[in-house]
Image: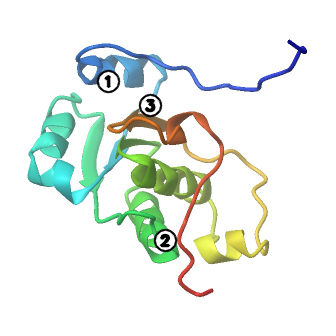
Amino acid sequence: MSAFFYYQTVPIEFGVRKLQSLPDIIRERGYHKGLLITTKSIVANGIADRVVAESGGLITDFTYGIQPNPTVQNTDDCIEVLRSGKYDFAVALGGGSVLDCAKVTTALAPTTATTQRFFDGEFVLTEPGLPLIAVPTTAGTASEITQVESDCNQRL
């Protein structure tokens, strides 16, 4: 086999009931006020409320409504929630669509850019975004370990 270089800076924690250690993971990283980004089904099942309640005040609220194959509008709505709440990190809990939306959301929240301006190349990221902790609920998308994001641009 030929030698190769693989760049991956994402720490991965895996295990049964790992979600219960989320507050410890947040504290270890020095974060203080977080937003949970998730889906309607996770909210409907009571999981979002449980994550917020069990975070020890570190995750103070959640937003949902991200559709499969998130739209630019989904992402902009999420960015606005993150900006207005003055959060210093986010947790994405869901499948690939939620994780993808959260990646752009946390990258753009500290800026004045919209998702469309960023995708059109009218805005270039020059500073790091907000920290994101990804908690995948599905297997196979690899969204939690890649720098790539997929949005559905309905303008096309």
**Label 1: how many Cα within 10 Å (few below 14, some 14–19, many 20+):** some
Query: Compared to 96, does 15 lie above or below?
Result: above
**Above-or-below relation of 26 to 85:** above
Residue 36 picture location, percent across and down:
32, 46
Label 1 sits on residue: 22
Residue sitting nearer the eye, 47 or 128 = 47
Amino acid carrying mark 1 in the image:
Leu
Q: Is residue 73 left or right of residue 110?
A: left
In which quadrant will I find the N terminus? top right
Colouring mode (rainbow / by chain / secondary structure / one colour): rainbow
Residue under the image location 28 percent in, 60 percent down: 64
Residue type highlighted by circle 2: Asp
Res. 114 in view: no
Q: Quadrant of the C terminus?
A: bottom right
Q: Which mark is residue 31?
A: 3
Residue 76 is labelled as 2
In the picture, measured across the screen, residue 37 lies left or right of residue 100, that is left
